[in-house]
Image (cartoon, coloured by chain):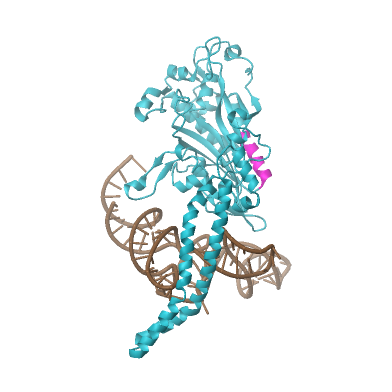
Chain colours: A cyan, B brown
RNA sequence: GGUGGGGUGGCAGAGUGGUUGAAUGUACCGGUCUUGAAAACCGGCAGGCCCGUCAGGGUCUCGAGGGUUCGAAUCCCUCCCCCACCGCCA
């Protein structure tokens, strides 16, 4: 969530942010509500102040009189009762004002809060303006030795590629039919070596982050409270995307939501905390099962492992000082980790600078990493797919947007309270990453070479099939 | 799931209707003393919001929400969480 004071002082900054991110938030309505709210607050507090003052003045007197009343009788008793009643009537008027303003407040506060939560983090200046993913700008690409992006798979490798769908079927790595039987559409069963490969990628990614990059591995809840979803910025916008467990409907407890990324649990860890400067930066990673309803994606990527309701993901987050240069440095480093992993697995990829229209509410800057998937895209003249990049990673800088919502602060050198800056980035999401992994390492006979870095996690198996 | 106990400042721990945003201890920060450290002593030490150029003022917060009252950390209701024991159990 954004800083309301900044909104008041620089409303255009946020009007532009809404426009550039192609969102629909009535910033001016929020400004009007905010002003009305402050006016109410002022009136209410003035009345309260008066009330407290009177209360302090007459309170002890009433106490004394009531004490006397206990032992009094006859005329004396009547006199005391009247005196007490007179004193007590004084604050009644003020109490009415407070209650009145409270009603006004309740009339506007829900809308005020709802709008506030929707105002997006403004993109940084260098983020290219654009409407959506088509306007993202390629930053650079990388391919393993012997792979030329300009050539087709067949030209590169000397044979027609199979899609990951064919490969997993051929080796019995994934069973889609039974997955659907058990869980419905967009479900699957990882089978045998398929499961081992899936686990190998995840284990490798966690170990890499822990051993080579100094990130602390964590296990965090994937079933979380609503405030965690709001705090991390996924709600209200992403409400339709999350599975909702309505425990409260059973008469007790609170509702819960299944997280779509480990980021939620990792960032929720220090919500409402004031960290000591030297605890920063926090460098955490986690592997967690991720759940996504894929609402609104009906009919899109229906086949295969690309778009599914449940998957596993190694995620990394950094919480650092409120410093732009530091945030950028961490962003670079986090992306570097991903590149090292992709390169070590021999996967071709490209980095995209996402345009304003492709950013979410919470980020000010985002780099997507897309891996080359030979089995995607339309069929070429040889009847084989021409291949296509598919998003496998996303690295965001959130400024203080998320920590502000989570109320995650630290005291800076000067002793000033500040909201920390946050970043997050996919390390490896599987089984989606298995698509390029299988397709890029397939051999003419359909067997698949297991990248060397994964073999220790596969019991030494070097080839599938 | 049952029964009982409990949620107060970084931690510990007072406080059961009225100058208590909260005693005291401890931790932490600054100072005195010391060659240095420790000890001792002195001082400081919650956050949000609103108003104000500043100085400062006001208001809210004692698990959360609601209620009673002129006034609530203190009384009532609902919920959440923690601890102990019993039952059940991956």
Q: Is residue A122 visible?
A: no
Foreground residue, A23 or A148? A23
Give the magenta range. Answer: A323-337
Q: Position of residue A454 (x, y in %)?
A: 53, 27
Q: Position of residue A334 (x, y in %)?
A: 61, 37
Residue displayed at 46% across by 80% down: A60
Is A198 placed left or right of A342 in the picture? left
Residue displayed at 52% across by 53% down: A272
Foreground residue, A79 or A322? A79
**Residue A362, relative to residue A142: is it above or below?**
below
Residue, far bottom: A75
Is B74 placed left or right of A331 in the picture? left
Foreground residue, A9 or A250? A9
Q: Position of residue A402 (x, y in %)?
A: 56, 46
Q: Is residue A47 visible?
A: yes
Foreground residue, A241 or A81? A81
Q: Quadrant of residue A330?
A: top right
Q: Position of residue A181 (x, y in %)?
A: 34, 26
Instruction: Determine if the magenta segment contains residue A314.
Output: no
**Residue A305, relative to residue A128: is it above or below?**
above
Residue displayed at 63% across by 51% down: A6
**Residue A410, relative to residue A448: is it above or below?**
below
């Amino acid at each position: 969530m954004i800083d309301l004071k900044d909104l008041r002082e620089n409303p255009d900054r946020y009007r532009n942010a809404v426009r550039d991110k192609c969102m629909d938030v009535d910033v001016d309505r929020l400004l009007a509500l905010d002003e009305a709210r402050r006016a109410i607050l002022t009136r209410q507090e003035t009345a309260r102040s008066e009330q407290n003052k009177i209360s302090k003045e007459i309170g002890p007197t009433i106490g004394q009189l009531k004490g006397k009343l206990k032992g009094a009788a006859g005329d004396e008793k009547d006199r005391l009762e009247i005196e007490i009643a007179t004193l007590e009537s004084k604050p009644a008027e003020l109490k009415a004002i407070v209650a009145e303003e409270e009603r006004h407040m309740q009339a506007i506060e829900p809308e005020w809060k709802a709008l506030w939560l929707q105002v997006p983090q403004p993109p940084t200046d260098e983020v290219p303006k654009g409407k959506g993913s088509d306007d993202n700008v390629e930053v650079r690409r990388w391919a393993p030795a012997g792979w030329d992006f300009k050539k087709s798979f067949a030209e590169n490798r000397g044979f027609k590629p199979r899609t990951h769908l064919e490969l997993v079927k051929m080796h019995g790595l994934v069973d889609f039919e039974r997955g659907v039987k058990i869980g419905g559409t967009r479900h699957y069963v990882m089978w045998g070596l398929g499961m081992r490969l899936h686990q190998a990628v995840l284990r490798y990614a966690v170990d890499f982050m822990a051993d080579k990059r100094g990130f602390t591995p964590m296990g965090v809840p994937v079933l979380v409270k609503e405030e965690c979803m709001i705090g991390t910025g996924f709600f209200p916008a992403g409400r339709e995307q999350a599975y909702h467990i309505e425990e409260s409907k059973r008469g007790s407890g609170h509702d819960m939501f299944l997280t779509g990324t480990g980021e939620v649990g990792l960032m929720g860890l220090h919500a409402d905390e004031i960290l000591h400067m030297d605890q920063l930066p926090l460098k955490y990673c986690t592997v967690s099962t991720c759940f996504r309803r894929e609402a609104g994606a009906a009919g899109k990527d229906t086949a295969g492992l690309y778009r599914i309701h449940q998957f596993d993901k190694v995620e990394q987050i950094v919480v650092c000082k409120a410093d732009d240069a530091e945030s950028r440095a961490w962003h670079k480093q986090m992306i570097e980790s991903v590149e090292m992993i992709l390169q070590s697995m021999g996967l071709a990829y490209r980095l995209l600078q996402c345009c304003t229209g492709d950013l979410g509410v919470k980020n000010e800057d985002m780099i997507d990493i897309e891996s080359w998937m030979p089995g995607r895209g339309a069929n070429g003249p040889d009847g084989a797919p021409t291949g296509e990049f598919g998003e496998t990673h996303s690295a965001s800088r959130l400024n203080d947007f998320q920590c502000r919502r989570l109320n995650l602060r630290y005291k800076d050198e000067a002793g000033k309270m500040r909201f920390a800056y946050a970043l997050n980035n996919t390390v490896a999401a599987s089984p989606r990453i298995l698509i390029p992994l299988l397709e890029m390492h397939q051999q003419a006979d359909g067997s698949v070479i297991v990248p060397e870095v994964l073999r220790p996690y596969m019991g030494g198996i070097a080839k599938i099939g």
